[in-house]
Image (cartoon, rainbow, N blue to C red):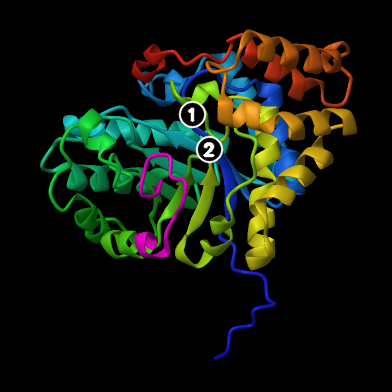
């Protein structure tokens, strides 16, 4: 069979996972993403902010009534837009004390989540201690217990070690031997598995790497793409506006899905986000620089778009800590006029940038323990 080079490359399901630490998005920003995603070629949204304690440290408790109301309203927005809606549950270190009660408590939580009628249920065991010999077996058992009661059509599991990056063992303890191979054998083939690439925040995804991961897990990885997320001490100093790299256009046949973890700034995140479906559509013809320029011009009024194009290097490459006082003042004066009236097109983009300049998105290490 000959390959038709003119045909668009295969694109896996594309979506956004709100899965970062730090300052959360507003409910109105989340709702606005429903139409934004469907308009620009995305298939799903997953609600999984690290700051939602009722999905993490306090996962066995119900959300307060107001938050439940907002979540049901959010779910309706995505149903009306035709975008799949997911929930990311992190039952914090539940696997460290295996028992019939721990299994039952997880199933009670999943049954409670069924009220939101999620299309996707994510079981997230990232950012937790993992130095247990039986880690893979215990996690697989919990995932299967959740699968028995969920109404979700798709289940995605995030392992504790979701990359080859040695930083994970440094922070969360030594990885048990044959961890990934055991997961590959014990997890039902229908369960998809998140993977961030060679590193936690990977710049590139070599084909050889993805094929190695597929062999280890016994299935194609579901990419958790940590671009343009900026929730770490280092990355929070940067506004990551540049388009997705051209290698994303060649990943499709090696992935079961592609989820993007955006920035703490929901509106500015839209600029790089609209370039990912474009990369998959255009394949070998995709170029990042014109994609970035076009994204700014499509989303922002002309004057603001040009300023963002001109200042991209200052915002993304130089970063907040390295900006001089003159550069900060220059940026503040350039973007403040767009925020004078909240109804102005582009006001939210400019407001996020000014808040970033004022340190409102500074990384707080305490959020890692919430």
Give the residue at x 61% y 23%. 25
Mark 1 neighbour density, 10 Å: few (under 14) some (14–19) many (20 or more):
many
Please give left or right for residue 250 compared with residue 35 in the image. Answer: left
Q: Position of residue 290 (x, y in %)?
A: 74, 50
Element under label 2?
loop
Please give left or right for residue 164 compared with residue 306 in the image. Answer: left
| Location of mark 2 (residue) | 261
Main secondary structure along the magenta-highlighted residues:
loop
Q: Magenta residues?
A: 195-210
Please, is residue 122 above or below residue 255 in the view? Answer: above
Work out how far the residue at label 1 is from the one at label 2, CA to CA, in angstroms.
7 Å
Please, is residue 22 above or below residue 252 in the view? Answer: above
Q: Position of residue 288 (x, y in %)?
A: 66, 51
Q: Earlier in the sequence, mark 1 or mark 2?
A: 1
Question: Does the magenta-highlighted stretch encompass residue 309?
Answer: no
Mark 2 neighbour density, 10 Å: few (under 14) some (14–19) many (20 or more):
many
Do the CB atoms of the residues marked 1 and 2 lie less than 8 Å apart?
Answer: yes
Give the residue at x 27% y 35%. 167
In the rendered image, the quadrant that contains the N terminus is: bottom right
Give the residue at x 88% y 13%. 341
Q: Position of residue 307 (x, y in %)?
A: 79, 28
Using the rendered image of the protein, determine whether residue 73 is visible from the camera's viewpoint. no
Q: Position of residue 241 (x, y in %)?
A: 65, 35
Element under label 1?
loop
- The label on residue 20 is 1
Give the residue at x 69% y 19%. 352
């Amino acid at each position: 069979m000959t390959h038709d080079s003119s045909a668009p490359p295969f694109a896996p399901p594309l979506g956004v996972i709100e899965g970062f630490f730090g300052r959360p998005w507003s409910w109105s920003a989340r709702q606005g993403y429903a139409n934004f995603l469907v308009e620009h070629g995305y298939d799903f949204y997953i609600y999984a902010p690290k700051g939602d304690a009722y999905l993490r440290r306090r996962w066995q408790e119900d959300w307060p009534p107001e938050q439940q109301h907002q979540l049901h309203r959010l779910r309706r927005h995505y149903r009306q837009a035709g975008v799949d809606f997911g929930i990311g549950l992190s039952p914090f270190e539940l696997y460290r004390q295996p028992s019939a009660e721990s299994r039952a408590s997880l199933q009670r939580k999943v049954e409670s989540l069924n009220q939101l009628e999620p299309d996707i249920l994510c079981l997230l065991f990232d950012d937790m201690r993992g130095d247990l010999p039986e880690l893979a077996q215990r996690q697989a058992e919990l995932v299967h217990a959740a699968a028995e009661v969920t109404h979700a059509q798709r289940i995605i599991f995030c392992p504790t070690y979701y990359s080859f990056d040695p930083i994970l063992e440094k922070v969360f303890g030594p990885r048990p031997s044959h961890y990934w191979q055991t997961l590959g054998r014990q997890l039902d083939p229908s369960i998809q598995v998140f993977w961030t690439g060679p590193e936690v925040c990977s710049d590139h995804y070599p084909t050889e790497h993805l094929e190695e991961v597929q062999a280890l897990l016994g299935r194609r990885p579901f990419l958790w793409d940590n671009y343009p997320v900026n929730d770490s001490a280092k990355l929070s100093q940067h506004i990551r506006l540049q388009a997705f790299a051209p290698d994303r256009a060649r990943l499709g046949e090696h992935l079961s899905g592609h989820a993007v973890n955006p920035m703490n700034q929901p509106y500015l995140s839209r600029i790089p986000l609209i370039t990912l479906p474009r990369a998959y559509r255009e394949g070998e013809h995709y170029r990042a620089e014109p994609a970035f320029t076009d994204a700014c011009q499509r989303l922002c009024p002309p004057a603001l778009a040009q300023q963002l194009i001109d200042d991209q290097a200052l915002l993304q490459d130089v970063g907040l800590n390295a900006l001089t006082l003159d550069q900060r003042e220059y940026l503040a004066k350039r973007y403040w006029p767009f925020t004078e009236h909240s109804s102005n097109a582009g006001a939210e983009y400019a407001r996020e940038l000014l808040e970033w300049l004022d340190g409102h998105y500074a990384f707080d290490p305490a959020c890692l323990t919430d």
